[in-house]
Image (cartoon, rainbow, N blue to C red):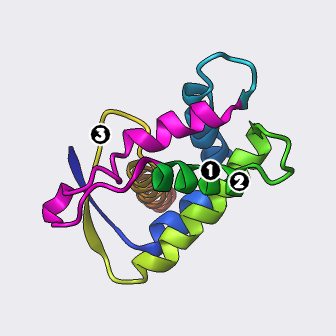
Amino acid sequence: MSVVVLDGSTVRSFVADEAAFARSVDARFAALDANGDGVLSRAELRRALESFRLLDGAGFGSAEPAPLPGEVAALYDAVFEQFDADHSGAVDRAEFRGEMRRIMLAVADGLGCQPLQVAVDDKGGSFLLEAAEHEAAMIAARVQEERDKTAAEEAADGK
């Protein structure tokens, strides 16, 4: 686990960088596409959702019992339907990108403008970690640009 500091603008900036966001989402898509057929089946997406362990019942100190299997199946089916925009029975890369964009922008709205410390999985695949790393790289590039500009100005003044 790692801890990153971010806010909604961190996530929005990451999503707005089409190339960086597409690379990240496409890598996640490829990892989820277990059979390599270029689409996510209901079972492949369900395995990904199950890995989040959000429906383990009494997790996180909850006194609530685990949901019934039928309730869990209905929830996973509803999530799959959100991703499967054309209702083809499979989620293609474009559908996955579109839904992940909507999800990440909703996360950005939820984070708001106050910086928060967030624990993220650093074993790969955390969009929030990638958003924070993207922001850090953008800041580093701006700092380097300023240093280069200052060095060029100093060199010109020294002539």
Q: Provide residue 156's location: percent of width, then percent of height.
A: 52, 57
* Residue plotted at (86% across, 50% down): 86
* Residue plotted at (15% across, 67% down): 63
Place residue 27 in its image quadrant: top right
- Residue range of the region highlighted in magenta in the rendering: 40-69
Q: Residue 77, labelled with which disc?
A: 1
Q: Residue 122, labelled with which disc?
A: 3
Q: Amino acid at mark 2?
A: Glu
Dot 3 surroundings within 10 Å: few (below 14), some, or many (20 or more)?
few
- Circle 2 SS class: helix
Magenta highlight on residue 43: yes
Give the CA distance from mark 2 to mark 1. 6 Å
Q: Is residue 116 left or right of residue 42?
A: left
Residues under numbered marks 2 and 1 in contact, where contact means CB atoms less than 8 Å apart = yes
Q: Given this view, does label 3 or label 2 mark the residue nearer the observer?
A: 2
Dot 1 surroundings within 10 Å: few (below 14), some, or many (20 or more)?
some
Q: Given this view, does label 3 or label 1 mark the residue nearer the observer?
A: 1
